[in-house]
Structures are given as C-alpha cells and as structure tokens.
C-alpha cells in the first residue's frame, strides 16, 4: 500500500493535469463531433473538410479551458506565444486525425457515417489527443516558476517532502 501511496504522491500533479485535460477535451470533443457531423450530414461536406472545420472550432474552445484551467498553474510565457504554439500543436493533432480518416475513406473505401466517425473521431482524436497532451505540457504551457500569488497545485507539498 505504501508503494501505491508513494506513486500517487509522486505523480499527483500529472494525474490532476490529465484529468483536467480530459474534462476540457470532453467538452471540445462534443463541439467537434457536433460540428463535424453537421457539416457531413446537413451540408454534405467532404470527409476531410468536415473533420478539419470541426477540429478547428473545437480547438478554440479547448484553448481557453487548457490555458486557464488545465495548465493554469504553470508558468505564463505570453498569450501570443501560447496561442501560436497551441494552434501549431493542434495542427499536428489535426493531421493525425486526417491521416486516420483518409486511410479509412480513401485507402480502405469505408465512407459511411460510422466508418468516418470511428476513423476520424475515435481513432484519430484518440491518437491526436495523446500528442496534444504531451506537446502542451512540453512546449505550450511549460513547467516553470510559479507566481507566488497563485494557489498551490494539489499535491505540491507532498512532492516537496513537506
């Protein structure tokens, strides 16, 4: 039991960030699914266009949630820098999604609504999200000195040995 407690204390900050990232991602995912499927069904948009537009709209929602809540305790490196890097990393995530969708629709010939959603919105979003979480933590919202006026992150005292 001591081992598990020690692991939790050591990785509590990562667990909390991942949970917040997942919550923000869930909201953005609903926005992305709704937008993408509306474009596909109501406007008969091509597969890749619907996926791209839906993801861009969701990215706008995700930026605010991730900057101010998920990674709000991390160093601030400037809104402009964070915004540009966030959209670049989301561009890479979008390319991952589009590659999965392209493989299903154009590579395997699976072009029904279910196939599009599984390829682009389940597999593509899943792989893209792994990349996004890692890249946000690494480049967009890097760890650094915290403003002493901000409240401590949960588990901070445990990591410092207090």
Image (cartoon, rainbow, N blue to C red):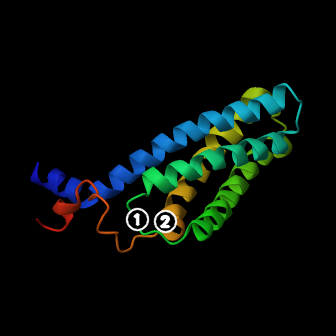
Residue corresponding to mark 2: 141
N-terminal of the pair, mark 1 or mark 2, is: 1
Judge from the rendering whether residue 75 lies leftward or rightward of residue 15; answer left or right.
right
Q: In this view, does 29 lie above or below 100?
A: above
Residue at figure coordinates x 42%, y 46% from the top left: 20
Location of residue 24 with respect to 42 vertically, above or below: below
Circle 1 residue? 74
Is mark 1 in CB contact (under 8 Å) with mark 2?
A: yes
Residue at the far front in the pictured view:
149
**Mark 1 crowdedness (10 Å alpha carbons): few <14, some 14-19, many ≥20:** some
Closer to the camera, 116 or 34? 34
Residue 156 x %, y %? 23, 61
Q: In this view, does 145 lie to the left or right of 129?
A: left
State the mark number for residue 129. Answer: none
Q: Position of residue 41 (x, y in %)?
A: 83, 26
Which residue is pictured at 82% across the width and 45% down the height? 48
Q: Whole-percent x and y of residue 14?
A: 35, 57
Query: Residue 72 location, x and y as percent?
Result: 42, 57
In the image: residue 80, left or right of residue 114: left
**How far apart are labels 1 and 2 at the CA level?**
6 Å
Looking at the rendered structure, the number of numbered marks drawn on it comes to 2
Q: Tell me the element at label 1.
A: loop
Q: Give the quadrant of residue 117.
A: top right
Say which residue appears at 11% left-offset and 48% top-offset.
Answer: 1
93 to the left or right of 116? left
């Amino acid at each position: 039991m001591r081992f598990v407690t020690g692991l939790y204390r050591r990785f509590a900050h990562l667990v909390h960030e991942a949970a917040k990232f997942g919550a923000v991602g869930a909201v953005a995912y609903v926005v992305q699914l709704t937008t993408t499927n509306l474009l596909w069904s109501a406007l008969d948009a091509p597969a890749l266009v619907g996926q791209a537009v839906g993801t861009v709209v969701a990215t706008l929602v995700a930026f605010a949630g991730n900057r101010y809540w998920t990674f709000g305790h991390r160093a601030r490196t400037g809104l402009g820098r964070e915004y540009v890097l966030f959209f670049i990393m989301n561009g890479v995530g979008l390319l991952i999604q589009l590659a999965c969708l392209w493989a299903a629709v154009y590579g395997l010939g699976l072009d029904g609504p279910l196939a599009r959603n599984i390829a682009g919105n389940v597999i593509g979003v899943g792989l893209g999200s792994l990349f996004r979480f890692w890249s946000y933590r690494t480049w967009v919202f890097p760890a650094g000195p915290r403003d002493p006026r901000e409240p401590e992150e949960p588990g901070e005292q445990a990591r410092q040995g207090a």
